[in-house]
Image (spheres, rainbow, N blue to C red):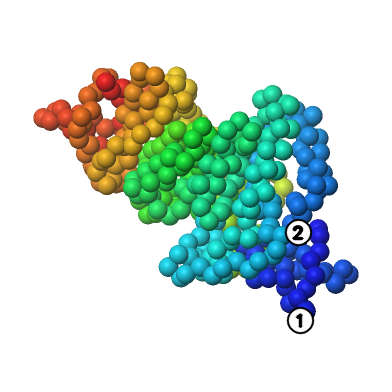
Amino acid sequence: MYGVDPKDDGSAPNNWLAIFGGCAWEWEPRRQQYYLHNFLKSQPDLNFHSSQVRQAVLNNVEFWLKKGVDGFRLDAITFCYHDEQLRDNPAKPKDQRQGRGFSEDNPYAYQYHYYNNTRPQTVGFIEELRALINRYPGAVTLGEVSSEDSLATMAEYTQGDDRLHMAYSFELLTDDFSAAYIRQTVEELEASIGDGWPCWAIGNHDVQRVATRWGKQQANPTMIKMLNALLFSLRGSVCSYQGEELGLTEAPIEFNQLQDPFGITFWPMFKGRDGCRTPMPWVKSADNAGFSDAQPWLPISAEHINSAVDVQEADNDSILNSYRHFLTWRKQLNVLIDGDIQFVDAHPNVLAFVRTLGSQRMLVLFNLSIQQSHFELTDIKLNSVLDGHGLATGHQDQQQANTIVLPSFSSFYAFID
């Protein structure tokens, strides 16, 4: 922790806000100074402008590298530095207040976070970190990015061989589940990332579970299997959040059960993140669903008991077995792992793209609707339709061979000429 003197009237140095509510500055009476906390007041920010602090962080990283860790997920990497002049963040117009990891009614959404976030010095520290990581072959870095333009920041932080290996953001952790939005998001990153490597997530510990957030009232096992396949079919690495392999929905949490300070502060407009953080159900009949013999931090959701691992392992058609099966199938197809991606125009309910690796081209389709959809093979010639993925699948229309019929929440994979 480091201190900053108050203004002459005793108020905080500037207008910066904490994501979890209130002023980002907390008074420390023993020092007669304020300290900065972008999150909780129990989480003082380090002063990365100090070379001693940076070296201490790197020493900590190397301590774990020497113990053989495989890498580091760098939480909130964009928050390392702050503006040394402590300038006020400008106000954000009401029509532009959209949250990524926070709701629009949070005052944090009322500002452009130009001065407490994503400062230019962060790239230099990332390069220092990567230089250390490179001394330990096989270790990897994954940055969590949240900024005013997260896709541009992801591209900047991963370009070349001397920055992060990959980064992910909240851009697919939104409520928008349209094919147009997914396409726009991926294309925007692909256009700017250059030789960088993307990483995608559709769920994590900070947002409502994807089966609820995107599934709304129509989620079913077919849809959830498709969502996992969609994530695994994009170009880049994947962050798959615990419970997605089981198709877990958002757990209902009462106020007196909350542990998340974020939710406690903003209840009931924002109910916090505990609904996606409840324990994994392992054994249906065991105490606490086999998660622990002790009382867990959060309750096991009654809605999750029948989705326990032991139940799904015994069901060949379960979401868990589909998840495992698809990943095994994917490993056999290098074009899905290393291929480029180019999106194709399609019906608004259909996400369509082509993965290309050398001379191999694969058409991939997802019907994001509960209603049947179609895809027209305009300027696309099928070579061979791929099966074996275990998903509900589309098929060529018997009367019109250039039309792919896509049943509710189905997928379609084919090699094309």
List the single residue furthest toward the front: 85
| Image label count | 2
* Quadrant where the image shows the C terminus: top left
Where residue 188 appears, as percent x and y from the top left, is 42, 44
> Does residue 358 show up?
yes
Q: Position of residue 276 (x, y in %)?
A: 55, 51
Which residue does the image show at 49% across and 35% down from the upper left?
Answer: 194
The mark that comes first in sequence, 2 or 1, is 1
- The residue pinned by badge 1 equals 9
Q: Amino acid at mark 2?
A: Pro
Residue shown at 20% from the left, 35% from the top = 376
The residue under label 2 is: 44
Amino acid on which the number 1 mark rests in the picture: Asp
Q: Nearer the viewer, residue 211 or 115?
A: 115
Q: Secondary structure at mark 2?
A: loop
- Quadrant of the rendered image containing residue 33: bottom right
> Is residue 59 found left or right of 328 in the rendered image?
right
Foreground of the two, 70 or 2: 2
Residue 177 versus residue 229 in the image, above or below: below
Q: Which residue sits furthest right?
A: 30
Within 10 Å of the Cα at label 1, are there few (<14), some (14-19), or many (20+) other Cα atoms? few
Q: Give percent across and percent down for residue 302.
A: 53, 52
Residue 268 in the image, given as x and y percentages of width and height:
54, 69
**SS for tag 1?**
loop
Q: Nearer the viewer, mark 2 or mark 1?
A: 1
Q: Quadrant of the N terminus?
A: bottom right
Question: What crowding class fits label 2: few (fewer than 14 Cα within 10 Å), some (14-19), or many (20 or more)?
Answer: some
**CA separation, marks 2 and 1?**
23 Å
